[in-house]
Image (tube, grey):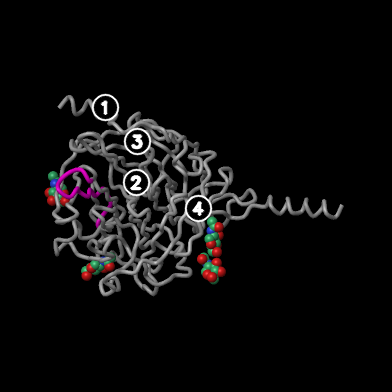
Amino acid sequence: MAFKACLALAALARAVDALSDAPSPDNFVRRGTTAAAVLGNYVYVDGGEISQYENGKIGNPASVTVNSTLSIDMSKSWTAGTVTIRTIPKTGPRKTNVQVWADPDTNSFYSWGGKWIGGVNMTKTELWKFTADGSGGGAWSVQDPANPNVFGGLIPGEFSAYTTAKGSGFLIGGIASGWTEIYRAKTQTIPGMLTFNIKSKVWENGTFSAGFSPFDTLSGASAQYVPTFGPNGLILVFGGWSPRVDAEPDIKVSPVFDLQNITFFDPETKKKYSQVTTGDVPPSPRGRFCTVGFEREGGYDIFLFGGMNQRAQTNFDDAYILSLPGFVWTKMPQNPAGNRAEHSCVAVGNRQVLSIGGTDMSWTKNDPAKQGLLLFDMTAMKWSDSYDAGAAAYEAPDTIKSWYTKK
Ligand SMILES: *[C@@H]1O[C@H](CO)[C@@H](O)[C@H](O)[C@H]1NC(C)=O
Ligand SMILES: *[C@@H]1O[C@H](CO)[C@@H](O)[C@H](O)[C@H]1NC(C)=O
Ligand SMILES: *[C@@H]1O[C@H](CO)[C@@H](O)[C@H](O)[C@H]1NC(C)=O
Ligand SMILES: *[C@@H]1O[C@H](CO)[C@@H](O)[C@H](O)[C@H]1NC(C)=O
């Protein structure tokens, strides 16, 4: 009798929900401000915040920091409503808006900057490295710089444009605040660009006026490395705006970058170019959206999804493909799960985009996308809640193919 009662109590105790970094699909509300990287058969998700039901209610505050690194197995097909998201303990700092550089060659990614919500438990500036174990787990360690003199002068921030190209991490612009850097008193725009050489661990930092950075300042933009054009490939930079260095960042009085005139640069020479695009140019101002690229025979196509118009304080729900070499935009069908900004996108299963998280100005409105996961088949131009591990190689959708044949 007493034994039975104990069992019943234990079962009850288990039925009480605790906050989780990967709550059940039914308890999930929203995830956002994450970064993601694909290493082998797994998608890893780092940083960010989550809101969820706890005992039937959303907490106050609604969103809390995610304390683990997540992984999703992409070797098998799955559906967003049931896929298991694994949590991996995180020894490094727990932040939102981190910027990551993936290095699939060594099965690792690096996490730089980002912000501690509430400025709680902040630690000194470090680069953290996640090394995957090949089976969906992995471990964190501090990556020391080869040139501590340069590293010591770097200002960690958020909202920069970042990508990995030619064995180096690139990071353009960003904004520093009292929540991104310990002992920082003032919010400050970070000018220029920094690079981190993954092999030599050497950091470089340079400005626009020195010819090192394609922009003076930049916030909320997205960078995409296209390896297949030019001797060194090219880094394309999309959207965002250019805050002043000498005042509080304010988009109302700052120039914004439209998506018609695209700036790009050579990652070796840093030489800057621009190209005016045609087709269905995405409306701007736009920031905090996601981009992800797909190589195909004779070209390269970049998917752009959602984001925020910070001037109007509204979010977007639209998606586009910018096709290279034509520099032509094509609008994609309406996504089934509404507006979102501050989400991450990665290329998975040959020709699919996986969009992770994102919010629509609220942490308490349930995400229509189960667990915040949305898939898009680039060739079929179809949104889905299911991932197909056996999808065929990417080829351009018919509308883009016919644009090239009509030329
Ligand atoms: C992460 O840790 C903090 C501090 O302990 C806690 O307040 C928060 O609820 C945790 N997040 C989750 C999702 O459990
Ligand atoms: C801050 O650190 C303390 C001590 O390790 C821990 O108990 C607390 O949960 C941490 N808070 C957050 C928000 O991480
Ligand atoms: C890079 O150098 C510039 C000019 O010295 C400086 O203002 C900027 O804060 C540095 N960038 C970073 C990320 O520290
Ligand atoms: C496009 O932007 C570049 C700056 O990156 C500028 O120099 C160029 O004049 C712009 N082109 C047009 C047509 O506006």
Is any atom of residue 246 visible in this view? no
Give the mark, 1 or 3, whose residue is nearer the N terminus: 3
Mark 4 and mark 2: Cα distance apart in space: 18 Å
Which amino acid type is marked by label 4?
Ile
Disc 1 and disc 2 in contact, CB within 8 angstroms: no
Question: Contact, CB < 8 Å: mark 4 with mark 2?
Answer: no
Name the residue: 15% across, 27% down.
407
Q: Residue 147, located in which quarter of the rendered image?
A: bottom left
Ligand 4 closer than 8 Å to the CB at disc 2?
no
Q: Is residue 307 above or below residue 215?
A: above
Q: Give the label on residue 351, or none.
A: 3
Q: Are marks 3 and 4 in contact (CB under 8 Å)?
A: no
Type of the residue with mark 1: Thr
Q: Which mark is residue 50?
A: 4
Residue at mark 1 to residue at mark 4: CA–CA distance? 38 Å
Front residue of this view, candidates 313 and 108? 108
